[in-house]
Image (cartoon, rainbow, N blue to C red):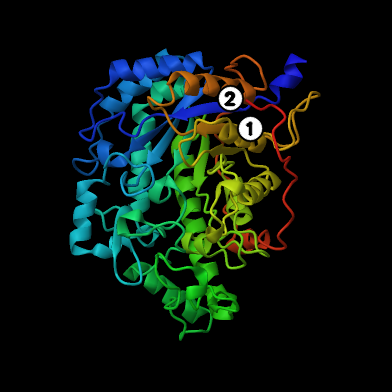
């Protein structure tokens, strides 16, 4: 039985605090961190996740990397016997939900933006967002001779060289490649720093000069030089019906609208593809899994226009699967997909947002499993209650435990957001320990579950036409039980 039961074990990781390393790139919380790691080990957790901030490590000058603070943290994690998921965080911390600390991208990169603000994502009214470089400069050598993709690749190379001992020892098992704001593969379509509030539809963010030129060239090539970027999609806090673009029979359903949405979402897929290819070269032969994070845009999911998903770059409609395309691209790199909002119930959402997190999770996980990917999830907001844990357990094994072997579908891992004093308060900690045990299929902690094979070279690039073929027809998702069979 034990072997069969083990096939139902889902690993649990816990995110370390955002400020575990100071804004000056020093590690000053050794005793506190050691005590937290001990609590996690006692709870049976498999490992931790940490943001590795580009703005700290290469913050002083180009090509000069300081890994000393991170090495101290990694050493503590290793001593605690925990595994480590490292996020290559090439975005700013600050300006998104839950950001308690401000870590901008490197100053010398921002300095380039003083004379050329178009290196940043820009909305239609010309507001720039300094959280992350626009994917429009992925191949532009604007940064002391390097392109944005070279900046990210060099950062990962330096990590690989300086963390070689932790990689070789099997401590670092997962490299999550940051691809946008909050480390997610998306456009910064709903920035709180610019006044967005839930459940606004957000805005298309492709008005820097590089993406504008790219679109003009694409429209011309398609025989429509008269087509421009949308001017009828409203502003951050509109509802869909207030805009011409998202209205019933709106622009999004016209040839011009479809052309734009295809271009906008394809740019994001290509951006992820190129950076994963670089990451694969860097970590070739290491026993790590590459991963990306996809954002859980659950508001306006229940209306035909899916407006908030579209502005974020996910071209998902009732008859088009905007997540299967991303999953298909990931098969080239054997990369895993990490999805969020796994703790949310539809019944907890306000009706005016037309929100459906449960159906969204079901769609995205089904798309990933159909493509044969390893999938992981995290919770979007801090939760300590049984309802949230039971929702996560249901999503982790949608049809429950299989006593005879591996369940048809299960998550490869779950990352809990995040380490805090509140988590370790008596009742919260007790519930969390039970949750970890249930995720482990009521088995003891086992470090040998799902061993990671050495990374092989990515396969040949998949043509975008082939990627788009999986978008339609949109298949029914796999069945999910209403509730977990192993509640906390």
> 99 or 414, which is in the foreground?
99
Q: Residue at x 35, y 35 (%)?
A: 52
Residue 82 as seen in the image, left or right of residue 328: left
> 424 or 342, which is in the foreground?
424
Q: Where is residue 33 shown, x and y percent of the image?
A: 34, 20
Q: Secondary structure at mark 1?
A: helix
Quote the CA–CA distance across marks 2 and 1: 8 Å
Q: Visible in this render: residue 282? A: yes
Q: Secondary structure at mark 2?
A: helix
Compare marks 2 and 1 and give the one earlier in the sequence.
Answer: 1
Q: Where is residue 487 shown, x and y percent of the image?
A: 66, 27
Instruction: Please report contact status of discs 2 and 1: CB closer than 8 Å, yes or no.
Output: yes
Residue 452 has which mark? none
Q: Which quadrant of the structure image shows residue 106?
A: top left
Q: Residue at x 46, y 18 (%)?
A: 426
Q: Visible in this render: residue 452? A: no
Residue 25 versus residue 339 in the image, above or below: above
Q: Where is residue 234 shown, x and y percent of the image?
A: 42, 73
In the picture of the structure, the residue carrying the numbered disc 1 is 393
Q: Where is residue 401 shown, x and y percent of the image?
A: 74, 28
Crowding at mark 1 (Cα within 10 Å: few <14, some 14-19, many 20+)? many
Q: Quadrant of the N terminus?
A: top right
Crowding at mark 2 (Cα within 10 Å: few <14, some 14-19, many 20+)? many
> 464 or 327, which is in the foreground?
327
Residue 280 versus residue 311 in the image, above or below: above
> 131 or 388, which is in the foreground?
388
In the picture of the structure, the residue carrying the numbered disc 2 is 435
């Amino acid at each position: 039985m034990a072997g069969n039961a083990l096939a139902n074990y889902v690993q649990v990781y816990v995110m370390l605090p955002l400020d575990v390393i100071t804004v000056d790139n020093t590690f000053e919380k050794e005793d506190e961190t050691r005590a937290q790691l001990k609590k996690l080990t006692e709870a049976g957790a498999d490992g931790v996740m940490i943001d590795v901030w580009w703005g700290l490590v290469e913050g002083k000058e180009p090509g000069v990397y300081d890994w000393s603070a991170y090495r101290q943290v990694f050493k503590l994690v290793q001593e605690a016997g925990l595994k480590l998921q490292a996020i290559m965080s090439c975005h700013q911390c600050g300006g998104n939900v839950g950001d308690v600390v401000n870590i901008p991208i490197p100053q010398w990169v921002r300095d380039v933006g003083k004379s050329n603000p178009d290196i940043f994502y820009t909305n239609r009214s010309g507001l720039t967002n300094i959280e992350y470089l626009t994917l429009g400069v992925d191949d532009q050598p604007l940064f002391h001779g390097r392109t944005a993709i070279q900046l990210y690749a060099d950062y990962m190379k330096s990590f690989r060289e300086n963390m070689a001992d932790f990689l070789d020892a099997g401590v670092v098992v997962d490299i999550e490649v940051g691809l946008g704001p909050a480390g997610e593969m998306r456009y910064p379509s709903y920035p709180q720093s610019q006044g967005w509030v839930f459940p606004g539809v957000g805005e298309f963010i492709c008005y820097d000069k590089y993406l504008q030129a790219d679109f003009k060239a694409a429209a011309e090539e398609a025989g429509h030089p008269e087509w421009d970027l949308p001017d009828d999609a409203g502003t951050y806090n509109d509802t869909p019906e207030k805009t011409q673009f998202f209205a019933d029979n709106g622009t999004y359903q016209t040839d011009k609208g479809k052309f734009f949405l295809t271009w906008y979402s394809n740019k994001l897929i290509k951006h992820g593809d190129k950076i994963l290819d670089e990451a694969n070269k860097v970590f070739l032969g290491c026993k790590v899994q590459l991963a990306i994070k996809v954002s859980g845009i659950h508001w306006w999911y229940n209306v035909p226009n899916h407006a908030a998903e579209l502005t974020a770059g996910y071209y998902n409609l009732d008859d088009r699967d905007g997540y299967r395309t991303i999953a298909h691209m990931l098969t080239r790199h054997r990369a895993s997909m990490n999805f969020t909002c796994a703790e949310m119930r539809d019944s907890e959402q306000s009706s005016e947002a037309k929100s459906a997190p449960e159906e969204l999770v079901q769609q995205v996980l089904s798309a990933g499993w159909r493509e044969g990917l390893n999938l992981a999830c995290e919770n979007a907001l801090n939760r300590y209650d049984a309802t949230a844990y039971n929702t996560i357990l249901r999503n982790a094994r949608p049809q429950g435990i299989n006593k005879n072997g591996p369940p048809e579908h299960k998550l490869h891992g779950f990352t809990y957001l995040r380490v805090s004093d509140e988590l370790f308060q008596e009742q919260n900690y007790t519930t969390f320990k039970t949750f970890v045990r249930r995720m482990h299929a009521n088995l003891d902690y086992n470090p040998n579950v799902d061993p990671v094979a050495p990374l092989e070279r990515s396969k040949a690039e998949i043509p975008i036409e082939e990627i788009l073929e999986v978008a339609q027809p949109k298949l029914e998702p796999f069945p999910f039980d209403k509730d977990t069979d192993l509640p906390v």
